[in-house]
Image (cartoon, rainbow, N blue to C red):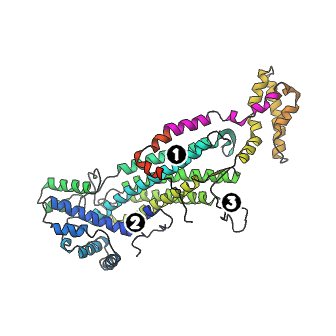
Amino acid sequence: MDVDTYQTPLSSRYASKEMAHLFSAANRFHTWRKLWLNLAIAEKQLGLPISEQAIEEMKANLHLDKQQFDIAAAEEKKRRHDVMAHVHTFGQVAPSAAGIIHLGATSCYVTDNADLIFIREALTLLIHKLAVVIDRFAKFAEQYRDLPTLGFTHFQPAQLTTVGKRATLWIQELLWDLRNLKRARDDIGFRGVKGTTGTQASFLTLFDGDHDKVEELDKRVTDLCGFSYAYPVTSQTYSRKIDADSLAPLASFGATAHKIATDLRLLANLKEVEEPFESTQIGSSAMAYKRNPMRSERICSLSRHLLVLHQNALMTTSVQWFERTLDDSANRRITLPEAFLTADIVLTTLQNVSEGLVVYPKVIARRISQELPFMATENIIMAIVKAGGDRQEAHEKIRVLSHEAAHQVKHLGLENDLIERVKADPYFNPIVAQLDTLLEPKSFIGRAPEQVDKFLAEWVKPALADQELQAGLASGEKAELNV
């Protein structure tokens, strides 16, 4: 077994080193040993006969080496019980503690508490990475705050917006994801020391019926493990609803990432905005000219997978019987790591895309010029009325000329010549000199630039000012893709 790789369908090759290590076998069993140590420390403090030598031997052997992994694997094959295999293995290197390791505990003391530790730490890693992605898109929005671009509703040409304003729509959803991830992370408690069916009966026996000591044991172990509180009641396991609640913001982020990547794929087709494309990159094995948006396609692909994993957690939550059933175990060992590894990969890819977006203003301007004449017709009508014309007559003139221009575009494949037709009609002579002004794209973008400025100043900047996020933002490291 590779002691630093948790065997899931998503190779750690694609995830960050931090996330891959978090869900590695080495870290999992190291965490189990820390939990056993903390339990022994608290039990000793509360009067159980545990020697200082036992504590010191446990402290000195919290990390497993290759030999210990081999011993644990052999024991698990024999005992068909992973926790007891590791209790035995730990006892071999901490012989003074062999008789008190796991004292009074059930397997879920280590498995469930460890999972809660991993979920909380994994959410923290995602929060930090998401903040960087938001920062990168914010810089992009600021740079292109006032660059007019054709808006689309129903993927049909609509009123103009700006490239930066469109990016703020992405950022706003990412800010909601940041909020949701923080809420989920900060809400996570500890299973604590609850016993086989959550009644703490074994610990009550250990402490000769002293309820106060049992409660104090639960509190001390919770504190030693770095949690502010333990769930007040549990069964043998912590409620699997915690898994569903923890994966919900990941799935919601997956929807956001899919939407952003889809927009970028459509923009790439329009040749207005493209994701990074390296000088030696091949877009197609057959069509050498192609620049396929493979990063955005990867984001969409993995994001769909992320959405599905949440459904898995919900289904597992719904079928837990009474105090516990084991049909959740194999499922969770795949679903939980895979959800966080997937989210991590999506974030890395999204950051890579956000750091290298290429905008083509001339292509954008050309598309605007093809559609703007139709959008400017109301302005033209208003101008001719101000010059003394009749609105109904002006409307009819524009209607006829618009249909003629549309025929040129749709049936003959020619350019939109509506403005030339307006100029050629004597009826519009009073406003011909105003046409260039009436057709200035920036006069059609409304308050888009000001909205970008206000959004970045009042929403994005405060969100990223959080001290927890500053270290990652200050590093300025760029996201590199392995493949």
- Looking at the image, which residue is at 82% across and 35% down? 419
- Looking at the image, which residue is at 84% across and 38% down? 404
Q: Position of residue 272 (x, y in %)?
A: 69, 49
Q: Position of residue 235 (x, y in %)?
A: 28, 58
- Look at label 2 and name its amino acid: Arg
Query: What secondary structure is the magenta-colored segment mainly?
Result: helix
Q: Which residues are magenta?
A: 433-458
Is 91 on the left-hand or right-hand side of 207? right
Q: Is residue 453 magenta?
A: yes
Q: Compared with residue 95, is residue 115 higher up or lower down, i.e. above or below?
A: above
Q: Which residue is mark 2?
A: 333
Q: Which residue is mark 1?
A: 173
Task: State how far apart marks 3 and 2 are (Cα).
Answer: 38 Å
Q: Is residue 233 magenta?
A: no
Q: Quadrant of the N terminus?
A: bottom left
Is 397 on the left-hand or right-hand side of 165? right
- Does residue 252 appear anywhere in the picture? no
Judge by depth and name the residue closer to the eye, 14 or 78: 14
Q: Residues within 10 Å of mark 3 (few under 14, many from 20)?
A: some
Q: Compared with residue 137, is residue 402 higher up or lower down, i.e. above or below?
A: above
- Which mark, by number, is residue 282? none
Task: Indicate which disc, 1 or 3, sits on the residue closer to the N terminus.
Answer: 1
- Quarter of the rendering containing residue 276: bottom right
Task: Indicate which disc, 3 or 2, sits on the residue closer to the N terminus.
Answer: 3
- Does residue 176 appear anywhere in the picture? yes
- Looking at the image, which residue is at 36% across and 49% down? 186
Q: Which residue is mark 3?
A: 291
